[in-house]
């Protein structure tokens, strides 16, 4: 919702920026998405919504609008616009800073009804595979939340290279599933830059190292890493705004030899496209006969719970 805390009269140039931002926001809200400031910024770059005066000179005499300076300028304008009631407070989210609250009940009846309403079973317990979605950036985890929730798939924000503790946790899940005859498939989403690409390899190498200590054929092919984005064919297809490759990165030399001096951030892709990539891959792995059997059991159990609730209210 729009709420005014500090009215402000904006210049014509800044008012145009606000109107363009609201146009992008309206589009994504109509599709059920909110945006981080970084995602909104990349839409400005991709759609060339920044004015020409925002061109920034970089090394080699080139000019670009895709520059951290413009990200900060956009952030400043939108901060003022939200305070002035010009931009919906719910439209731009900060997924890296959240308040952790505790669940409370209002009554026993409400608690029982909430349990019935939210009752579910593990939809993947009778599947041949288990799926997880891993995303490099915490700020993008929300893009996948709705799809992962729809298909009962866990998702994880790596925040760059995954930690040793997180890798070990993944190893334990992979091992335990393999004991039950299930393969784990991790769908990885990361930037197309020297480190972002290497992160997919790093996840696979860590898990291989840990799994290789296990004995038995059940562990030979118990997991797979599938990098769904950002890949070079997607760069060519969607033409996201480039950024200079990080030349200080120890992997930059090999990257530049293969892809040139530009890199591309995952944030620059349309959130609906990222979500569809995940959904298409997840649904391709579902055994729908088993899935429907599980859904039928959930409905049966919910009816049993409904009976308990009705009896408790007599």
Image: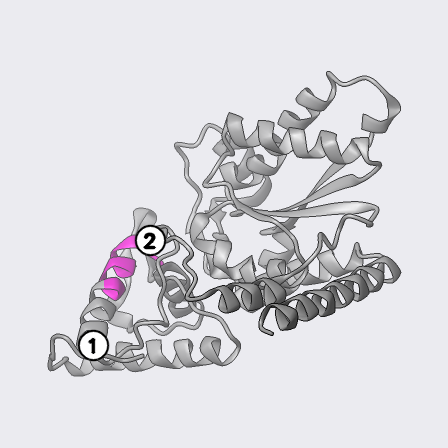
- In the rendered image, residue 151, in percent from the top left (x then y), is placed at 68, 60
Q: How many numbered discs, if any?
A: 2
The residue nearer to you, when weighing 309 against 8, is 309
The disc placed on residue 99 is 2
The disc placed on residue 126 is none
Asked whether 153 falls inside the magenta stretch, the response is no
Q: Earlier in the sequence, mark 2 or mark 1?
A: 1
- What is the CA distance from the residue labelled 2 to the residue labelled 1? 32 Å
Mark nearer the viewer, 2 or 1: 2
- In the rendered image, residue 53, in percent from the top left (x then y), is placed at 23, 70
The disc placed on residue 14 is 1
Residue in the picture at 57% in, 44% down:
259
Quadrant in which the N terminus is drawn = bottom left
Secondary structure mostly seen in magenta is helix
Residue 301 appears in which quarter of the rendering? bottom right
Residue range corresponding to the magenta coloring = 66-75
The residue nearer to you, when weighing 140 against 300, is 300
Q: Secondary structure beneath disc 2?
A: loop
| Residue 178 drawn above or below residue 152 | above
């Amino acid at each position: 919702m729009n709420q005014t805390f500090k009215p402000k009269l904006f210049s014509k140039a800044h008012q145009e920026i606000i109107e363009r931002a609201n146009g992008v926001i309206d589009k994504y809200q109509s599709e059920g998405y909110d945006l981080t400031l970084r995602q909104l910024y990349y839409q400005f770059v991709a759609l060339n919504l920044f004015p020409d005066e925002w061109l920034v000179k970089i090394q080699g005499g080139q000019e670009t609008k895709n520059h951290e300076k413009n990200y900060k300028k956009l952030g400043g304008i939108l901060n003022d616009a939200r305070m002035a009631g010009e931009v919906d407070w719910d439209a731009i989210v900060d997924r890296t800073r959240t308040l952790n609250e505790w669940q409370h009940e209002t009554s026993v009846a409400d608690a029982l009804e909430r349990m019935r309403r939210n009752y579910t079973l593990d939809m993947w317990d009778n599947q041949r595979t288990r799926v997880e979605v891993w995303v490099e950036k915490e700020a993008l985890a929300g893009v996948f939340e709705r799809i992962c929730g729809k298909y009962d798939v866990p998702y994880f924000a790596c925040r760059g290279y995954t930690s040793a503790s997180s890798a070990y946790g993944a190893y334990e899940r992979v091992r335990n599933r393999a004991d039950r005859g299930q393969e784990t498939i991790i769908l990885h989403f990361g930037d197309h830059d020297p480190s972002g690409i290497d992160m997919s390899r790093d996840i696979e190498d860590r898990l291989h190292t840990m799994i290789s200590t296990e004995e038995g054929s059940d562990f030979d092919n118990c997991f797979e890493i599938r990098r769904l984005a950002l890949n070079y064919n997607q760069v060519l297809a969607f033409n996201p705004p480039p950024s200079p490759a990080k030349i200080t990165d120890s992997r930059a030399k090999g990257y530049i030899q293969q892809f040139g001096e530009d890199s591309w951030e995952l944030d620059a892709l349309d959130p609906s496209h990222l979500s569809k990539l995940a959904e298409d891959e997840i649904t391709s792995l579902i055994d729908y006969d088993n899935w429907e059997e599980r859904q039928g059991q959930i409905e049966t159990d919910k009816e049993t719970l409904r009976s308990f609730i009705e009896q408790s209210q007599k």
